[in-house]
Image (cartoon, rainbow, N blue to C red):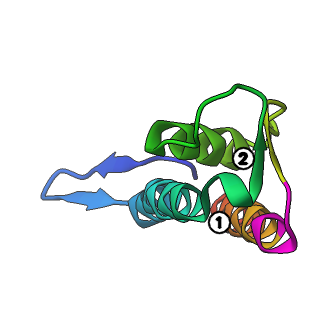
Amino acid sequence: MGYLLHLNVKHAKIFGQEKLIVLLVSIFIFSLIYYHLGDRHYNVKSTHKLYYFDGLYLSVVTQSLLGPGDITPRTNIARFFLLLQVSVTLFITFVYINE
């Protein structure tokens, strides 16, 4: 349980890597969504625009369930995507734990 790679004498079996791949892909998908939503939908404490790196930062911090403090959602659509990302993260995490 929890092993990414289980070595067998004859061949290697891979366990759980598809969930890790889904989590990593979801980070990049949600970071693109946050980047395209832009400044109209998020409050950014600094004076610059919301760049892709800021969207990636928001995605990683949201997916780690820490919660960002310097970038906050302003509109309901922004809140929806943050809630969707947290839901995907929790679902994949609980599926991984229950194996």
Q: Which numbered marker is on residue 36?
A: none
Relative depth, front residue between 88 and 55: 55
Q: Does 75 lie within the magenta span?
A: yes
Residue segment shown in magenta:
74-79
In the displayed structure image, the side of residue 29 where residue 83 appears, left or right: right
For this orientation, the residue located farthest to the front is: 47
Total marks placed: 2
Residue at position x 72%, y 46% in the image: 62
Q: Quadrant of residue 25?
A: bottom left
Q: According to the image, label 1 marks what residue?
A: 92
Relative depth, front residue between 93 and 87: 87
Mark closer to the observer (1, 2): 2
In the displayed structure image, the side of residue 84 where residue 73 appears, left or right: right
Query: Is 84 drawn above or below residue 4 in the view shown?
Result: below
Instruction: Say which amino acid is labelled 1.
Output: Ile
Residue at position x 47%, y 60% in the image: 32
Instruction: Say which amino acid is labelled 2.
Output: Thr
Dot 2 falls on a residue whose secondary structure is helix
Q: CA distance from mark 1 to mark 2?
A: 14 Å
Label located before the other in sequence (1 or 2): 2
Residue at position x 56%, y 46% in the image: 55
Q: Which numbered marker is on residue 62?
A: 2
